[in-house]
Image: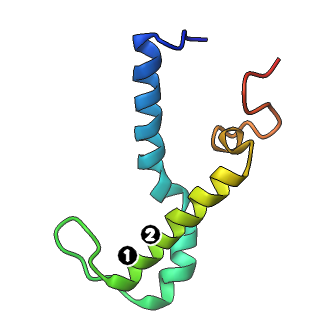
Amino acid sequence: MLPEKSVYNVIVSILMVVTCIGSFPLYLAPAHEVVEGSWGEPKMNRYFITSPRFVFFRIVETALVSVVAKLLPSFSAILGFNILGRAEGGS
């Protein structure tokens, strides 16, 4: 385990956030296919979706996942696929 004030701990924490942000769309791709499948092709510019319906759905979806994460005490174990382990400092 890394010390709390260690530079390595900060680097690992930053990289974990980047990984979660980058993998979030991949985890929810099946849900997007089910919900957005009947909406047709989204309007896009070069990099981003610009269709209001798609953008609104993604914002609401992210907010709901954030609320669930706040309400579940062991959400970090779920994210780490460690369902049977403890969320914080297992023995």
Q: Nearer the viewer, residue 7 or 54?
A: 7
Q: Is residue 7 left or right of residue 43?
A: right
Image quarter for residue 40?
Answer: bottom left
Label 2, on which residue? 59
Question: Going 43% across and 48% down the picture, which residue do you hit?
Answer: 21
Q: Nearer the viewer, residue 64 or 45?
A: 64
The correct choice, above or below, for 48 with respect to 85 in the image is below
Question: Going 72% across and 28% down the picture, which residue do you hit?
Answer: 88
> In what element is the residue under mark 2?
helix
Type of amino acid under label 1: Val
The correct choice, above or below, for 54 with respect to 89 in the image is below
Could you tell me residue 14's position as x and y percent? 41, 30
Image quarter for residue 3?
Answer: top right
Could you tell me residue 22's position as x and y percent? 41, 48
Q: Nearer the viewer, residue 64 or 42?
A: 64
Q: Mark 2 to mark 1: distance in Å? A: 6 Å
Which part of the image, by quadrant, shows the C terminus?
Answer: top right
Label 1, on which residue? 55
Type of amino acid under label 2: Ile
> In what element is the residue under mark 1?
helix
Q: Looking at this rendering, what residue extends furthest in the left direction? A: 46
- How packed mark 1 is, by other alpha carbons closer than 10 Å (few <14, some 14-19, many 20 or more), is some
Question: Going 53% across and 64% down the picture, which residue do you hit?
Answer: 63
The correct choice, above or below, for 63 with respect to 11 in the image is below
Asked if the residues shown at circle 2 and circle 1 are in contact, with their CB atoms under 8 angstroms apart, the answer is yes
Which part of the image, by quadrant, shows the N terminus?
Answer: top right
Image quarter for residue 86?
Answer: top right
The correct choice, above or below, for 70 with respect to 88 in the image is below
